[in-house]
Image (cartoon, rainbow, N blue to C red):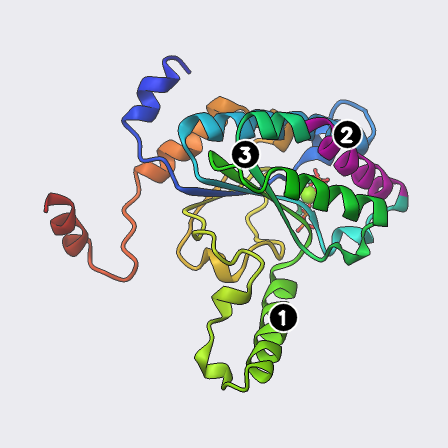
Amino acid sequence: MQDTDSQINRTTVPRHIAIIMDGNGRWALRQNKARTYGHKAGVNALKQTIESCASYGVDVLTVFAFSSENWLRPKQEVDVLMGLFMLTLKNQAKKLLKNNIRLKIIGDRSRFSLTLQEKIEEVEKLTSNNSAMTLVIAANYGGQWDINQAIKRLAKHAKEARQSVDEFEINDFLSTAGLPEPDLFIRTGGEQRISNFLLWQIAYSELYFTDVLWPDFDQNELLTAIMSYSSRQRRFGHTGEQINEQAIK
Ligand code: IPE
Ligand code: IPE
Ligand code: MG
């Protein structure tokens, strides 16, 4: 695709993009390689996507890296994924700092090794004052886990404050508290399901599914997704006419 910049100028860029990065395993198997080879290639696709989103002025990019159900995979694959997570955090910390990108990890990190937990905290702290874009990595994340932990924390908070639970909003206790809701939700790899990624937060997200396998997802594919998003009318319950009137004002 040529002249990317002029295409993006004519396009509404989503403020928050959420991506299920699926298809690494199939990408590798198609080349008679081990599934883990696909995960390594997936990291490169992620790096490219981060750069593209930052250059388009996206505020928040949230990616699903490891679901709470992915522990069910063969131990060897899980070990490689954990190793890649650690390695990528180590290798990319300086680059995130240089590019003014804030890193936030969401999910139940208590199941990770202590060294990985420490690394996560270190890179989050290092990048906490960055403001160009927030990169949210969902790791050992599940949408149901998130809602569950939010309700438990809300109830505890209300009890400690001696107030009724009615005084508080679930939104403020989700792991994504303070972030805008995803405008564009992308899933690569051909499946049309949510697989326990963000559940509450995608109430009004525009959904985009592509057969492209995650390691093949490049700037052109991202642009195609953003173009699809920008051609849609988001109504949030209003009529199309009401939205058109608002646009004229
Ligand atoms: C997504 O790719 C990455 C993770 C779930 C960690 P997959 O590994 O699910 O790839 P497929 O779906 O088997 O091709
Ligand atoms: C979702 O993909 C999780 C990630 C991409 C990290 P899966 O490959 O685990 O989803 P299912 O099992 O096909 O639904
Ligand atoms: Mg998959």
Q: Which residue is pictured at 57% across the width and 31% down the height? A: 212
| Image location (x, y in percent) of residue 129 | 54, 40
Task: Tell me where the magenta segment starts and ends, as one range.
Answer: 76-92
Between marks 1 and 2 in the image, the one whose residue lies nearer the viewer: 1
Is residue 180 covered in magenta? no
Q: Is mark 3 within 8 Å of ligand 2?
A: no
The answer to whether 197 is drawn above or below residue 213 in the figure is: below
Q: Is residue 76 above or below residue 114?
A: above
Left or right: residue 76 versus residue 161 is right
Per the image, the residue denoted by label 2 is: 29
| Image vertical order of residue 121 relative to residue 204, above or below | above
Q: Residues within 10 Å of mark 2 (few under 14, many from 20)?
A: some
Residue under label 1, please give it.
148
Q: Secondary structure at mark 3?
A: strand
Instruction: Identify the amino acid type marked 1.
Output: Asn
Q: Mark 3 is on which residue type?
A: Ile
Nearer the observer, disc 3 or disc 2? 3
Sequence-earlier tag: 3 or 2? 2
Q: Which residue is mark 3?
A: 101
